[in-house]
Image (tube, rainbow, N blue to C red):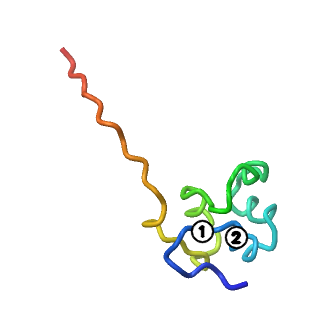
Amino acid sequence: MSPHTGPRPMKKHEVIGYFGNMARAMKAIGISRSLAVKWGEVIPAQHAVSFVIASNGELRLGLEDYPLIKEQDHPTQQAA
């Protein structure tokens, strides 16, 4: 399987294809394999970035395809 090259979210099967299995993939980015069980097919953005780094850029992702969590506007409190 070829590495992820398109501008789209990184998928589990692409990571497994690159690292050989999910256990090796999780070890490469230093997180528990049990965490990956909770993921769907799409790798969460923060971990996808780690896979890009661990693969020296061979795995790629399109950040524009990950939904951004918008911060809610909170009034700022000023010190009296």
Quarter the C terminus occupies: top left
In the image, which disc is placed on residue 66?
none
- Residue 1, position as x, y percentages in the image: 73, 84
Local crowd size for mark 1, using a 10 Å CA cut-off: few (<14), some (14–19), many (≥20):
many
Task: Give the labeled residue for mark 1.
Answer: 10
- For this rendering, which residue is in front, 4 or 25? 4
The quarter of the picture where residue 4 lies is: bottom right
- Residue 10, position as x, y percentages in the image: 60, 68
Q: Which amino acid, mark 2? A: Val
Which of the marked residues, 2 or 1, is nearer the chain's N terminus?
A: 1
Local crowd size for mark 2, using a 10 Å CA cut-off: few (<14), some (14–19), many (≥20):
many
Say how many tags the image has: 2
Toward the top, the furthest residue is: 80
Look at the picture and state if 64 lies above or below 68.
Answer: below
Look at the picture and state if 1 lies above or below 43.
Answer: below
| Tag 1 secondary structure | loop
| Tag 2 secondary structure | helix
- Residue 63, position as x, y percentages in the image: 46, 66
- For this rendering, which residue is in front, 34 or 79? 34
Task: Give the labeled residue for mark 2.
Answer: 15
Look at the picture and state if 1 lies above or below 38.
Answer: below
Q: CA distance from mark 2 to mark 1?
A: 8 Å
Q: Which amino acid, mark 1? A: Met
The quarter of the picture where residue 18 lies is: bottom right
Toward the left, the furthest residue is: 80
Q: Residue at x 68, y 53 (%)?
A: 39
Look at the picture and state if 16 lies above or below 36.
Answer: below
Instruction: Kindly indicate whether the residue at mark 1 contacts the one at mark 2 (C-beta within 8 angstroms).
Output: yes
Q: Residue at x 47, y 66 (%)?
A: 65
- Residue 8, position as x, y percentages in the image: 52, 72
Q: Residue at x 42, y 66 (%)?
A: 64
